[in-house]
Amino acid sequence: MAKFRRGPAAAAEPKPSRRQSTFVRNFFFKAGEKTLLQLLPATLDGRDDLTVTLDDDTVAVLAHEWVNVGTRDNGKTHYETFVSRRDKSLEGVDGVDLIWDFGDGKIYWPSEVTYAVAMELEGDYETVKGRKKLKGVTPKMRSYTDKEGVEHEVPVIGVIAQKWSNFWEPLSVLQDDKGFDLESTVFAVVRTSDDNGKTVYSWIDQTVEAVDPEEYKDAFIDLENYLTELADLDRMKGFIESLPEDHVLNEYQYKNYLKKQSEAKKDDKPASNKGRGKKAKDDDETTPPWKEDGEGSDDFEALKNEINSTP
């Protein structure tokens, strides 16, 4: 198993099928809405307790998000996420990445994404002097029916996949300032925009008792195993190899690529040297052309909102 960029190595590598979808809930944060959550350990392997730290329980990877791999039986676009084998925790520049190389190899670049595990909470409010005040929380629950027709109720536990710079860094700063323990703190996460339209996330620690996660350990997600599935090369081949050469894997990255090509032609300059900042490195195929913010990562926001609003 790959040792991703955090903590001790996790358990034995799973063996996903060639076209296996990963049925793990992802958290999305709608603009202006407040989400109550509690962070959980990235893995229980080798743990004596449920302590959570940003050093041990956040994992950074190069990820291809919202990859269009075809159409589902219901007629809707089928999106998948993949971890690039060129992540430096895996094979690095020698790794095989069919998405990165799709087209002319300069369209579908991955983004640096930091993952963690969290439980969504529901708030119990009271009105004090005309103002709504949070007085307690419980796990938000969801129901599902298994193949045998048995209905189950489980807590909403999923993964958060966001950039470090505008999502996790504010939490790191807040923790350094207040010194609280992450595993025993309830947070309200709010997504807004600054004056320039850039997405901003705020973490607000709540003065209520956190949920005891011991009761829900059976529903925890092993983040290392989950990311290993996303990085499985056979899984990527199963989804990508059968696609036609002109298939658009990500319409936003593709539109950005066409825009840069058009700008390059207007300036009568080679397209490969236009609009990428570090021109010398962009022409070096051994240098991964990504940075922490991720090439075109802001363009995923509209698509995320669209997917999140789809029943």
Image (cartoon, grey):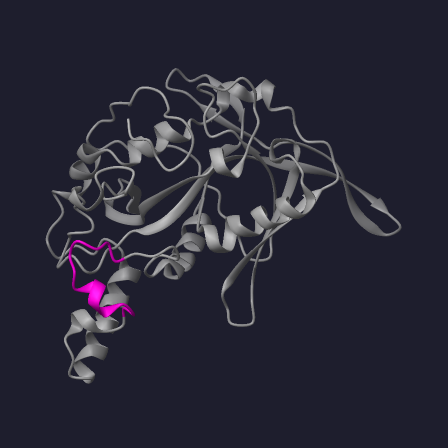
**Residue 288 is covered by the magenta coloring:** yes
Residue furthest right in the image: 129
In the picture, measured across the screen, residue 290 lies left or right of residue 163, that is: left
Residue drawn at x 46%, y 30% as measured from the top left: 42
Against 251, residue 19 (above or below) is: above
In the picture, measured across the screen, residue 189 lies left or right of residue 8, that is: right
Q: Specify the principal SS of the magenta part.
A: loop
Quarter location, residue 178: top right
In the picture, measured across the screen, residue 156 lies left or right of residue 7, that is: right
Quarter the N terminus occupies: top left
User: Can residue 204 be seen at all in this image of the molecule?
Assistant: yes
Residue drawn at x 22%, y 33% as measured from the top left: 19
Against 63, residue 282 (above or below) is: below
Residue 278 at x, y percent in the picture = 27, 67
Image: magenta residue range: 276-289
Say which of 164 and 255 sits in front.
Answer: 164
Residue drawn at x 41%, y 50% as measured from the top left: 307
Residue 267 at x, y percent in the picture = 20, 84
Residue drawn at x 34%, y 57% as measured from the top left: 291
Against 156, residue 284 (above or below) is: below
Against 137, residue 15 (above or below) is: above
User: Can residue 29 be seen at all in this image of the molecule?
Assistant: no
**Residue 213 is covered by the magenta coloring:** no
